[in-house]
Image (cartoon, grey):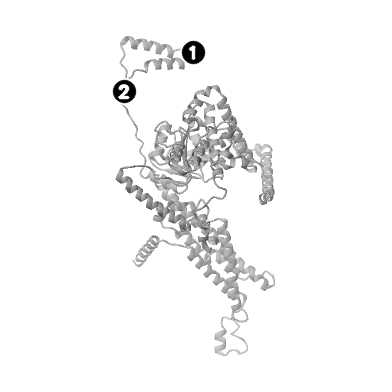
Amino acid sequence: MKILTDAAANEWLTKFKEASTSIDDRDSKLTAVAYEIEKDLHIVGATAIEDRLQDGVPETIANLEKAGIKLWVLTGDKRETAIEIGYSTKVLTPQMHLTEVVDGPQQNVKALVAMELMRHIKIGNLPDYQLAALDENKRFSLKSLLKIFVLLGNWWRRTWLIWRRFYLMSIKRMWLSKEDYLDYSEELDEDVVAEKRRADPRIQRRKVRELAREIIEDFWKDPKNTNAIKQHDDEGSMVSDDPPAVFQRAKSAKASITRRGKNDESNTTESSRIQKLALARVSVDNKETFDEEALSMQSYRPAKAATNFDKKKRTIFEKAFATDSFVRHGKLSKHLKKEYLDALAIDEKEQSGRQEIESMVGSSSATKPKGHFDVSSVKRGLVVEGAALKHLLGDPVLEEMLFAVASCSDSVIACRVSPIQKALLLKMVRKYVSPTPTTLAIGDGANDVGMIQEAHIGIGISGLEGQQAVNASDFAIAQFRFLESLLLIHGRWNFMRMSKAILFFFYKNALLIGTMIVFTPYCLYSGTPLYDQWVISVFNFVGGSIPILFMAFFDRDLPRDYVMRHPQVYESGPNNEFLSLRMTFRWVVICIIQIYTVYYFSAPGLELGGGMTSAFKGLMGNWNRDVVGDGEGGDLKVFGTTIYSQLIYVVTFKVRKHTIVSPDLQQTIYSHLISLQSLLRR
């Protein structure tokens, strides 16, 4: 509030009336009048709106991050609120280095993104953008030989795009409406751009790199940025190595490196050199500090880095049959070297003794870190304002530059974004992030509908915001915390069951046809089927499908409680361990072995009269001593149906072997069966 005299109030009202009725430059005059009155104010009170988080949101987000799921937050809140919510939901952590791309002059926004890109290149987070990866490799290798097939595929896709464009311009345009024609043309243009990037992604990456250099060079040469240069020299803020300006909660990479470098007495010289190189100003004038090949942390590692794992401890089964790469490469705790385990035991004893001494003397000094600190291991977060996105969206090179930086960030928050920008951001994630990720969008309001529809999987939260998000989504949940069970439990089980079911359906049909192929030489390649036609038809409907469906419904390789305690097991799905090439090849080998085993363990016993079904009865009844049996059986149907029965047994036992029914599910099924039995008795 502000208390005015009658004269001051009348004077200001006169000025306000003149400014509001002015024809020329009305906005600036109203602003000047507002500045005149809005000073020397007294605060009467403050109001606030509390937007409380639902129960379990921070824990759910933390577990999803442990599961290897990368989280992006797209919100309409302002930057300060979005950052605070990011900390409260554990999307951001105090140890995370935070980069804020705020609204400002176009040159400053582009320069900040370009500097962050070059920083990631220098510390080795973007090896595909380094000069070594962009240069043409002219040496002959197996990859160059395989490029022939790649070129053929590119030629075919280009031919198909040319035909689609000709078909659109000449034929399809006649019956398409103007809106449909524009939509189809825009989709075709996107396919053309994607094809150019797919043909040789290094061309686009080289453009991104060159544009970043040009932006940085123009920024430092502009005399308007004198204050920014001075501020950078003093604090390093232009390369975003300072903590967030609002809360001062995040620890910067510079502070972490400095602290660790001081504590590591054995690597003082190397640490100081790495600090200078890692935090050097991004500039094109200083060629030494701009050469990311020399600045990359990867270049300071030994060519043959020492490992603490002993590969000799791997078993034959782990080498040949393990689908998990950590098990196959011998990177489990049981594969650690003995000297490393002994060193860990000594360190634990020293640390416990040091803590005991510190507790006695009241010291809180940090323990001595072990080994070399890698700058690329620092977690990084990116905060982008919607107003800053307008300087970057629309240009494919700038968009790829932004998403190259975002792909290196552990968490991304886009604040003050409109519903259209939410959908565009998600669309560009699918377009520029390589490899193309599977996207999931979750929201509870009408402003999230575009984002939900653009994602591969859309989830709506039913609540106070209405049902628009739920109606436009693929799945609907009541609270955000239910997303943890939907992904980590049901999503993982579903992918595991579907992978096994696909392999089983191919396996059982290959087993059936394989035995028929093995039988082909014995029928002189006449095409005579080993099995009766009715038997073949029933196999896919009843004989081989019912056990597989049982497995697809009830298989649980890991209990629910174990998965919730160890969300890292979810990574087996994104890593495609259930349906990898290695797993498929294993099934092919097992299928071939079982084909020959089933046939040659069954056929010899059925040949030369062994298939006579009534042999015992005919001999004992003394019907005809010259003919074994009474003439029934021993034909091709009996021969094939007997082998068919062995196939059913093999498929059923293999399904039983691969099906793991947890004890809680067994108890549930048993209780339902008891209830059904009592109901039938009534």
Residue type at tag 1? Asp
* Residue found 41% across the figure and 57% down from its top: 559
> x, y (%) of residue 217?
58, 28
- Quarter of the picture containing the N terminus is top left
Q: Is residue 110 left or right of residue 465?
A: right
Q: Is residue 564 visible?
A: no
Look at the image and tell me in which quarter the C terminus lies: bottom left
- Residue to which mark 1 is pinned: 24
Say which residue appears at 49% left-offset and 61% top-offset: 549
> CA–CA distance between discs 2 and 1?
35 Å
- Give the mark nearer the N terminus: 2 vs 1: 1
Q: Which numbered disc covers residue 462?
A: none
How many labels sit on residues? 2
| Dot 1 alpha-carbon crowd within 10 angstroms: few under 14, some 14 to 19, many 20 or more | few
User: Viewer-proximal residue, 13 or 235?
Assistant: 235
- Circle 2 or circle 1, nearest the eye: 2
**Quarter where residue 115 is shown:** top right
Note whether 11 is above or below 222 in the view shown: above
Which residue occupies the foreground of this view, 411 or 149? Answer: 411
- Disc 1 element: loop
166 over 232 or under it: above or below: below
Residue type for callout 2: Ile
Picture coordinates of residue 72 (x, y %)?
Answer: 47, 40
Nearer the observer, 101 or 53: 101
Residue 234 visible at all: yes
The image shows residue 231, relative to residue 514, as above or below, that is above
Q: Quickly name the residue at label 2.
A: 43
Left or right: 131 in relation to 51? right
Looking at the picture, how far across and down is residue 310, in whole percent? 51, 57
